[in-house]
Amino acid sequence: MRHGKKFNHLSRKKGHRKALLKNMAISLIAHKRIKTTVAKAKALRKYIEPLLTRAKKAASEEKIKDATHHRRVIFSHLQNKEAVKTLFGEIAMKIADRPGGYVRILRTGFRQNDAADMCIIELVDFNTNALETKTTKKKRTRRSRKKKSETTTTETATTEAVVEDNEDAVVEDNNTNEEE
């Protein structure tokens, strides 16, 4: 039964799971994207989204003394000064106008040795590849049946005209031959 199972335990005890998520969150903040399994990525998303929201609030309330409280709460989760500095410095400014959904999970297929479902989890506003390749593609249009039938009728009309011209030329040649 599934009663009371609010999150994925990831086949680990509480302390190991907490350390895993903390280290993955620090790596995601530092590198902006990491490669992991889908189950770990989904657990990490639940872990890091509230932290990113809190950092965004603190960036908007910079004048208020409450920003220090947000910083300390995030530090209690991450316990890494560099990650907190990066989070409040560049990441909070980029996600300031985003209402939620700060991370993206992109599936990459299966791992070779154990066939685990792998993915890349990344911060949405830091994907430079997607931002650069966001050019508008040429819109594909499908031709309707009417256009195809019109083109075929014009093609048949031109072939009939060519045939008639050839027949007229042959008839004229015959007439000139008879007159001589």
Image: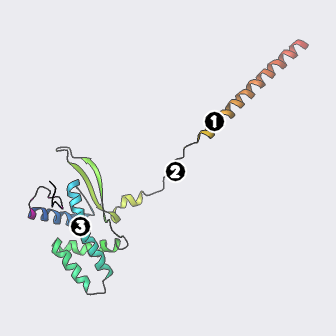
**Residue drawn at x 28%, y 79% as measured from the top left:** 58
Amino acid type, callout 3: Ile
Coordinates of residue 27 in the picture (x, y in percent): 21, 64
SS class, disc 1 = helix
- According to the image, label 3 marks what residue? 48
Q: Give the mark, 2 or 1, whose residue is nearer the N terminus.
A: 2
- According to the image, label 1 marks what residue? 149
Coordinates of residue 97 in the picture (x, y in percent): 38, 73
Whole-number angstrom distance, CA of label 3 to CA of label 1: 58 Å
- According to the image, label 2 marks what residue? 139
Q: Is residue 111 magenta?
A: no
Q: Is residue 65 above or below residue 132?
A: below
Amino acid type, callout 2: Lys
Span highlighted in magenta in the image: 6-14
Amino acid type, callout 1: Ser
Q: Give the mark, 3 or 1, whose residue is nearer the N terminus.
A: 3
Whole-number angstrom distance, CA of label 2 to CA of label 1: 23 Å
